[in-house]
């Protein structure tokens, strides 16, 4: 499975993919298309930042 590390992080952080996409300011469909192929490290870094942002917004 591609981007398994990110998918595991979604599960651990208890956030949905659409919430991460929203935190990144992109559509859910765009984000899902990104996940079809292994992302470069630069994009993974952006996704991880968005995961943290989504978690913070849930806690607020």
Image (cartoon, grey):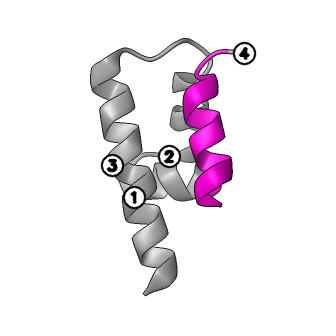
Q: Is residue 54 positioned above or below 45 on the image?
A: below
Cα separation, mark 4 vs mark 3, equals 22 Å
Q: Is residue 51 magenta?
A: no
Mark 2 sits on what residue?
27
Mark 1 sits on what residue?
52
At label 1, counting other C-alpha atoms closer than 10 Å, the crowd grade (few under 14, some 14-19, many 20 or more) is some
Residue 25: tell me if it is visible: no
Residue stretch in magenta: 2-16
Q: Is residue 44 positioned above or below 26 on the image?
A: above
Q: Earlier in the sequence, mark 3 or mark 2?
A: 2
Q: Earlier in the sequence, mark 1 or mark 2?
A: 2
Asked if the residue under mark 3 is in contact with the one under mark 1, i.e. CB atoms within 8 Å, the reply is yes
Label 4 secondary element:
loop
Q: Earlier in the sequence, mark 4 or mark 2?
A: 4
Q: Is residue 48 positioned above or below 33 on the image?
A: below
Mark 4 sits on what residue?
1
Label 2 secondary element:
loop
8 to the left or right of 26 = right
44 to the left or right of 5 = left
Mark 3 sits on what residue?
49
Cα separation, mark 1 vs mark 2, equals 18 Å
Asked if the residue under mark 2 is in contact with the one under mark 4, i.e. CB atoms within 8 Å, the reply is no
Residue 54, percent across and down?
Answer: 46, 64
At label 3, counting other C-alpha atoms closer than 10 Å, the crowd grade (few under 14, some 14-19, many 20 or more) is some
Label 3 secondary element:
helix
Instruction: Name the residue nearer the viewer: 22 or 15.
Output: 15
Residue 26, percent across and down?
Answer: 42, 46
Asked if the residue under mark 3 is in contact with the one under mark 4, i.e. CB atoms within 8 Å, the reply is no
Q: Residue at x 37, y 62 (%)?
A: 53
Label 1 secondary element:
helix
Cα separation, mark 3 vs mark 2, equals 17 Å
């Amino acid at each position: 499975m591609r981007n398994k590390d990110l998918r595991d992080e979604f599960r651990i952080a208890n956030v949905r993919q659409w919430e991460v996409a929203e935190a990144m300011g992109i559509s859910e469909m765009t984000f899902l298309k990104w996940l079809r192929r292994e992302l470069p490290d630069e994009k993974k870094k952006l996704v991880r930042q968005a995961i943290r942002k989504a978690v913070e917004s849930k806690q607020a």
